[in-house]
Amino acid sequence: MRTTRKIWAVAAGISGLAMIVTACSSTGGNTTSPTTGAPATTAASTEKITLKIQTFNEFGYADLFTQYMKDHPNITIVHDKAAKSDDARAAVKNSIATNTVTDDIVAADLDWMPELLKSSDFFADVSTADNKNRWPDWKTAQATDAKGKVIGLGTDSGPQGLCYRKDLFQKAGLPTDRAAVAELLGGTSATWDKYFSVGDQFMKANTGAAWFDSLGALAQVANNQQAEPFESKADDSITVAKADSPAKTVYTMLTAHTNQSAHLAQWTDDWTKAFASDKFATVMCPAWMTQIIAGNAPDQKNWDIADVLPGGSSNWGGSYLLVPAGGTHVDAAKALADWLTAPAQAAAVFVKYGNFPSQSDAVKDPSVTAKTDAYYNNAPTGQIFSNRFSAVGHQPYRGSHYFDINDQFGKALTRVDVDKTDTPDASWTKFLSAVSQLG
Amino acid sequence: MATTTELEISPPVGDHRRRRPSRLRQKLGRFDVKASPYLYISPFFILFAITGLFPLLYTAYVSVSKWNLLTGRHGSAGFANYVAVLHQPFFWKALRNTVSIFLLSSVPQIILALVIAAVLHANLRARTFWRMGVLVPYVVAPVAVGLIFGQMFADQSGMVNALLTKIGMNPVAWHAQVLPAHLAIATMVNYRWLGYNTLVVLAAMQAIPNDVFEAAIIDGASRVRQFFSVTIPMIRPTLIFVIITSTIGGLQIFDEPTMFDQQNGALTAGGADGQFVTVTMYLYQLGWGSQNNLGRSAAVAWLLFLIILIISLVNYGLTQRIASEGGVSGRRGRRRKKVAA
């Protein structure tokens, strides 16, 4: 009983808050009358308004807000930063569910976009002639609804390279130089077969370390490399049960190499601690992962990064800025979101905070490509991720059930690899049964 | 007689003036006595109707509708949501986990609370220090508890497994196996709530008049006999309160198991094989996860409501019986002795 009460209280609380906030912002807008006698267009741009923007984690916008407010004295930006991305996700969904606008701009992770696109009416079309070609197609496609309406402006991205431990490679008699490592794994034509065969070589050297952290981490890459990993693009039907489905192929390939795994599930304490010790030699490395490794193992000086990825290329993560269509200052909000996601600003955020841009021009910006990272032995991380970004050709089809199936897929691998509670076949049967229960 | 007549005659005159307002006043007075207590407590019930009863009924309405969190209601579903939920093995797994974690946490918690309260009730040096000491874990934020215990119960690098290996035992797969996972979560719950329950029980113990104990001592009752025949029957109402609240809290457990899953966020937490997913977690994941199936989520909420109701009633009945048996015999025994004396 208290649960239902709690949930509805939260909903009521949020909508109540929404009403208060909208009331406040509308009075804020109305009390200040435009300068008398000025033409209508000028009046609109000098009207004192407050824009509320909700983000999560670290978007690196603090300096940009200050600058924007300096350039636009009539605009006050209120930054509402959620502690966790789950909180921000719940807030966005609640505002759609109750059809109330709390923030003029909301940030959304790539993972939530399929859900939000189903309610694309709630958001304004943010595409302009000017920003239309700012991103590669695969980035914009994830924010475009079936009718071609663009609801999100891309912020950052997660092109993936391969992070590896120099000392462990040396112990196993493998090359340690980052160009040589990229070459060893196949360079631009790197395949999963090559990755696992080098893995075999590494395991035979008995360094005490495993080749990679867990199957789940690899699945994230391998599934993102499929065009239609779980569902058919034609009719959104779930295809995983077919014997030759892409999901089954990936599953079979990965579970055949459980012996190269350190059996450490991502994000667990065991996993974060392992970066400092000698548990595994390689880890799939989206741009943002470099900070996570450095943060968890500040004293481990042997991590390096190679410009290569098994299976070619892949992007993991990245966010968007969305503008709810029912807001009080939709045009001003659109202008701010457009400015924040312009290449120059995105490059500035990367240089200071390390969030890798998703804008084609920003990725090639000299300030981005010149960036090096002392933690990775002064690796040219800017140039490496710029290369990794340019290699990304597509994003997988994400249908109605993508995230639930992806979650179940990861759990199926965890059962085999980390928990060791099931054989690969038994775990696959459980996976199919869980998928069939989705509704 | 004359006096009475006089008296009878004279009052009506004055009465006519005085009684009219007094009748109203009397009515008002009666109304005041009868209704005002309800008016005084009505703010709570009005608030409850808005924040408790209405959502409860509305949830029932949602549970018989096809309802997507984001796109809203899509017509009636009858009992299809209930049927779908009851046919999902995952629901039963969640229910099994919930009951198991509830039993592993509430039962030892209340027994330990009783014992610790009895110890604290004794004459100890610096007893305020000891009494406040047991409440310290309650002040620790649940998230912090989750972090601390998450480190302790980590499968490879955890302290508990390190200790187990030191004393020659095999390390336990805390996240992979069902019962160890439940034990670890129950430990978190007990850590947080034991002190709270201890203090509630202790307060009740302190309210027991001393002469009852003195009488028991004169009767030659041992410490243990006093505890079972005097203390427990005397704190029965408090015990019922503690048991019912921990039943409700225990069956709604959400934070601890959610944080125990470090690999997955709240929307997918509960272990790779649902080893420690609970009913409230399942409810949240159905309605707020990618499925956005608020209809099924509401159905789970109502099923949970009914389950809590039933278990609370069973608990109430049990405590009533166990405690009153001890109480009656204790009181009777005393009375008999007093009469004899």
Image: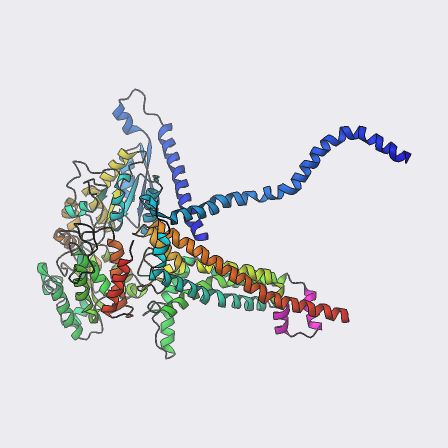
Main SS of residues in magenta: helix
Q: Residue at x 43, y 64 (%)?
A: B99
Q: Position of residue B7 (x, y in %)?
A: 86, 33
User: What residue range appears in magenta?
Assistant: B209-230
Residue A287: quarter of image:
bottom left
Residue B60 position within the rendered picture, expressed as x and y whole percent measured from the top left: 42, 49
Residue at (67% x, 63% y) in the render: B209
- Residue drawn where x is 26% and y is 54% of the image: A403
Q: Relative to B126, does residue A48 appear above or below in the rendering?
A: above
Colour scheme of the picture: rainbow
In depth, the one of A104 and A396 nearer the eye is A396
Q: Is residue A334 left or right of residue A50?
A: left
Q: Residue furthest right?
A: B2
Q: Give the x, y percent position of residue B50.
A: 48, 43
Residue that appears at 41% across and 68% down: B183
Q: Residue furthest front?
A: B78
Q: Is residue B225 magenta?
A: yes
Relative depth, front residue between A434 and A348: A434
Residue A254 seen from this side: yes
Q: Residue furthest top?
A: A37
**Which residue is outermost to the bottom?**
B168
On the rendered structure, is B225 left or right of A280?
Answer: right
Q: Nearer the viewer, residue A320 or B53?
A: B53
A146 w.r.t. B113: above or below: above
* Residue A45 included in the magenta stretch of the image: no
Q: Is residue A262 visible?
A: no
Q: Quadrant of residue A160?
A: bottom left
